Amino acid sequence: MRSSMTAIALAIAIAAPTAAFAGDRAAGGAAAGAATGAATGAVVGGPVGAAVGAGVGGVVGAASTPDRRVRTYVTEQERPSVVYSGDVTVGKRLPQDVEVYSVPDSDYSYTVVNKRRYIVNSDREVVEVVE
């Protein structure tokens, strides 16, 4: 029981400051991945699992973050805004009736919904809000 509490406390100690950086677009995927990896690692492997999980999660999260070139391209394009009444948030999949546009030389696409730009992956899942 005591080791479980120690693991949870360590996971929170690692995840809290890491999550604070999630607002930074460039570090967002890495920070979110590290926070999730730390919490999961703590549950599965205790304090050592938390540390390993944070490292692995950070690498995976960084790999899934669009680079600056993609963001620049998306902000420079002129596309009509689609009116959509549902929630458009990171992690949500867009319905098929919302048009997305390919980003050249990239695995990402983008759309403009309710006058905001969103980068989406090949599964139409929102990965970033571009502001």
Image: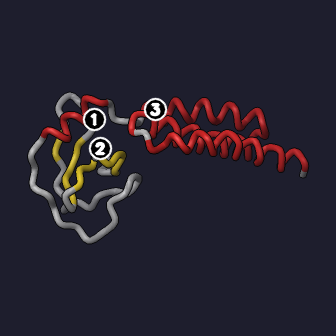
- Circle 2 or circle 3, nearest the eye: 3
Residue at the location (63% across, 45% down)? 16
Q: Which mark is residue 122?
A: 2
> Disc 3 to disc 1, how far (Cα)?
15 Å
Residue at the location (58% across, 39% down)? 18
Mark 3 surroundings within 10 Å by alpha-carbon count, few (fewer than 14), some (14 through 19), many (20 or more): some
Q: At which x and y percent is residue 45?
A: 76, 39
Q: Is residue 59 left or right of residue 12?
A: left
Q: Are marks 1 and 2 in contact (CB under 8 Å)?
A: yes
Q: At which x and y percent is residue 10?
A: 75, 41
Q: Which mark is residue 24?
A: none
Q: Nearer the viewer, residue 119 or 72?
A: 72
Residue farthest to the bottom, as pictured:
85
Residue at disc 1, secondary structure: loop
Residue flagged by tag 2: what amino acid is it?
Ser
- Can you tell which quarter of the image residue 96 is in? bottom left
Q: Residue at label 1?
A: 107
Q: At which x and y percent is residue 49?
A: 73, 36
Q: Residue at label 3?
A: 62
Q: At which x and y percent is residue 126?
A: 34, 50
Please determine whether, in this image, residue 50 is positioned above or below residue 115: above
Residue at the location (59% across, 31% down)? 56
